[in-house]
Amino acid sequence: MIDKESMHDWMLIEISLNWEAASVSVVFENQMSLVRTVTATEVVELYVPRKNEWGPSRCVNAIAFDSRPSQQYHSLSIEMQSGDVIRLVAKDINIPTD
């Protein structure tokens, strides 16, 4: 399981939603300049604010992943260093571990 600090300072590159397939890809560059992608299928919610309340930044501050076996859907919240929180709810969410 990934902890909330493991994606700290990853840079957000792109968020892509395939409406028909109900899938989302969130592409990052990690601290070693490697591209890593979070993928989600059977997506029911995607919230992407960009208010920059703490100032502009494309870096991740922390994440929260809720994946309880009793739940039908899982959620991922990505807090950006801008203060914005991206939220994704889907049947399956695959998060890279490095």
Image (cartoon, rainbow, N blue to C red):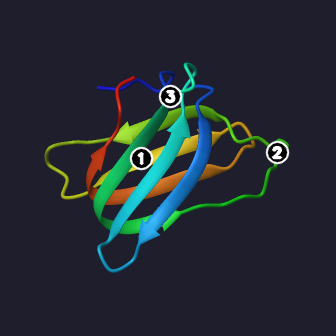
Kindly identify which residue carries mark 2. 56
Quarter of the picture containing the N terminus is: top left
> Which is in the foreground here, disc 1 or disc 3?
3
Q: Position of residue 66 (x, y in %)?
A: 33, 42
The residue lying furthest to the right in this view is 55
Circles 1 and 3 in contact, beta carbons < 8 Å: no
Q: Secondary structure at mark 2?
A: loop
Compared to 62, does 87 lie above or below? below
Which of disc 1 and disc 2 is earlier in sequence? 2
* Amino acid type of the residue tagged 3 in the rendering: Leu
* Amino acid type of the residue tagged 2 in the rendering: Pro
The residue lying furthest to the left in this view is 70
Q: Position of residue 70 (x, y in %)?
A: 14, 48
Compared to 76, does 29 lie above or below? above
Kindly identify which residue carries mark 1. 76
* Amino acid type of the residue tagged 1 in the rendering: Leu
In this rendering, would 66 be left or right of 48?
A: left
Which residue is depicted at the point 55% across and 19% down?
Answer: 32
Q: Position of residue 40 (x, y in %)?
A: 32, 55
User: Is the residue marked by circle 1 packed among few (<14), some (14-19), or many (20+) residues within 10 Å?
Assistant: many
Relative depth, front residue between 70 and 5: 5
Which residue is depicted at the point 85% across and 43% down?
Answer: 55
The span from disc 1 to disc 3 (Cα, nearest Å) is 21 Å
The span from disc 3 to disc 2 (Cα, nearest Å) is 22 Å
Quarter of the picture containing the C terminus is: top left
Which of disc 2 and disc 3 is earlier in sequence? 3
Which residue is depicted at the point 39% across and 77% down?
Answer: 19
Kindly identify which residue carries mark 3. 34
The span from disc 2 to disc 1 (Cα, nearest Å) is 21 Å
